[in-house]
Image (cartoon, grey):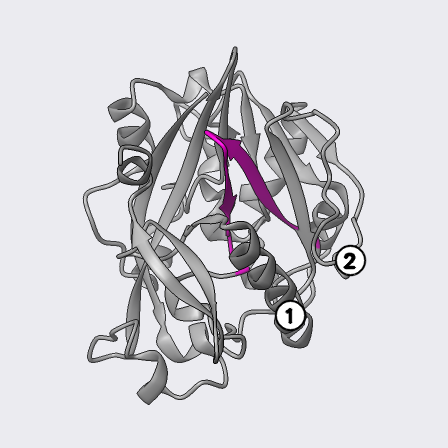
């Protein structure tokens, strides 16, 4: 097995929105804001070579929306999904499995692109199976008013129309110390799925076994190292008290089992570990994935 970090670009969101009830005097210690109160965030994806499978987890915002739409997010940086795949030696046609943690625009926008004459849409990954959780899919295609702006039909419906969509099903009992996972070998024996309901319904958190460690793709359960303390929860979360409980169980398990946390949205820190302290679970160290395994 080999792992590749795939950076698909940076964007900006309001810092207050990303930290909910926590005041700026506290969250700005770890996530600096610009003059408009915006913080910079990454859309960092993970590519897994596992035998004859090439598995990509999430794919960023894509590039098919118009300039007015993207102007709200202040795109920045030199990365893009296709450029990063090429740097790793691959193209979109090489991907065999596209795992979508959830269907918010900044996680699945790269799934779909315009066709050659821009008369309609087509899948970006022509040879891939697209994996979504069955319950989350239903949640996304019939969105509530609060999340509607994050579930863009052009990012979602063409996946099913392509015939490339398959389901991951089941909701393990998170309350049992976070120990129950979906692992039916759909994605191979090295990948299992934890399902969370706080940020959005049935968000998938992939766990990857690699070189004796467990790497956890954090998606929006914990967007950055600044979100480690339990109350630091984005206002985007639909059920913040459930997120609070999920983070509590997960972070204690992560500290106990020395998980490596792969951070999708932290524009500075690629990965981190956590540890138990007198103040609860807190940051232990940050590092790049390849540096950790090159020690």
Compared to 63, does 201 lie above or below? Answer: below
Q: At 40% from the left edge and 62% from the top edge, which residue is drawn?
A: 224
Compared to 110, does 145 lie above or below? Answer: below
State which region is magenta: 202-221
Q: Which mark is residue 238?
A: 1
Q: At 27% from the left edge and 55% from the top edge, which residue is drawn?
A: 75
Magenta stretch: includes residue 219: yes
For the residues carrying marks 1 and 2, which lies nearer the camera in this image? 2
Between 293 and 270, the one nearer to me in the picture:
293
- Secondary element under disc 1, as helix, strand or loop, is loop
**Residue 120 visible in rendering:** no
x%, y% of residue 291? 26, 38
**In the image as oriented, which residue stretches furthest toward the top?**
52
C-alpha distance separating marks 1 and 2: 22 Å
- Please state if 188 lies on the left or on the right of 139 as rendered: left
Q: Which residue is mark 2?
A: 176
**Residue 118 visible in rendering:** yes
Quick one: label 1 or label 2, which is nearer the N terminus?
2
Q: At 75% from the left edge and 47% from the top edge, which residue is drawn?
A: 180
């Amino acid at each position: 097995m080999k792992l590749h970090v795939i950076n698909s670009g940076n964007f900006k969101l309001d810092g207050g929105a990303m930290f909910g009830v926590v005041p700026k005097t506290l969250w700005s210690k770890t996530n600096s804001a610009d003059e408009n109160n915006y913080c910079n965030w990454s859309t960092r994806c993970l590519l897994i070579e596992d035998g004859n499978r090439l598995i990509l987890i999430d794919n960023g915002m894509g590039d098919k929306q118009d300039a007015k739409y993207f102007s709200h997010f202040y795109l920045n940086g030199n990365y893009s999904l296709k450029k990063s795949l090429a740097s790793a030696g691959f193209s979109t046609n090489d991907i065999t499995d596209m795992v979508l943690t959830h269907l918010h625009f900044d996680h699945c926008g790269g799934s779909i692109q315009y066709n050659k004459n821009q008369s309609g849409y087509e899948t970006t990954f022509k040879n891939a199976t697209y994996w979504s959780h069955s319950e989350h899919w239903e949640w996304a295609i019939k969105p509530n008013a609060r999340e509607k702006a994050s579930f863009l039909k052009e990012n979602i419906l063409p996946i099913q129309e392509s015939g490339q969509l398959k389901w991951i099903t089941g909701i393990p009992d998170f309350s049992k110390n976070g120990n129950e996972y979906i692992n039916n070998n759909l994605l191979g024996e090295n990948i299992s799925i934890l399902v969370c309901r706080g940020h959005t319904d049935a968000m998938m958190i992939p766990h990857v076994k690699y070189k004796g460690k467990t790497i956890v793709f954090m998606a929006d359960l914990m967007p950055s190292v600044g979100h480690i303390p339990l109350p630091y929860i984005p206002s985007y979360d639909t059920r913040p008290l459930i997120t609070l409980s999920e983070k509590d169980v997960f972070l204690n398990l992560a500290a106990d089992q020395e998980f490596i946390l792969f951070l999708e949205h932290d524009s500075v820190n690629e990965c981190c570990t956590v540890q138990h302290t007198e103040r609860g679970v807190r940051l232990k160290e940050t590092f790049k994935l390849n540096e950790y395994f090159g020690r």
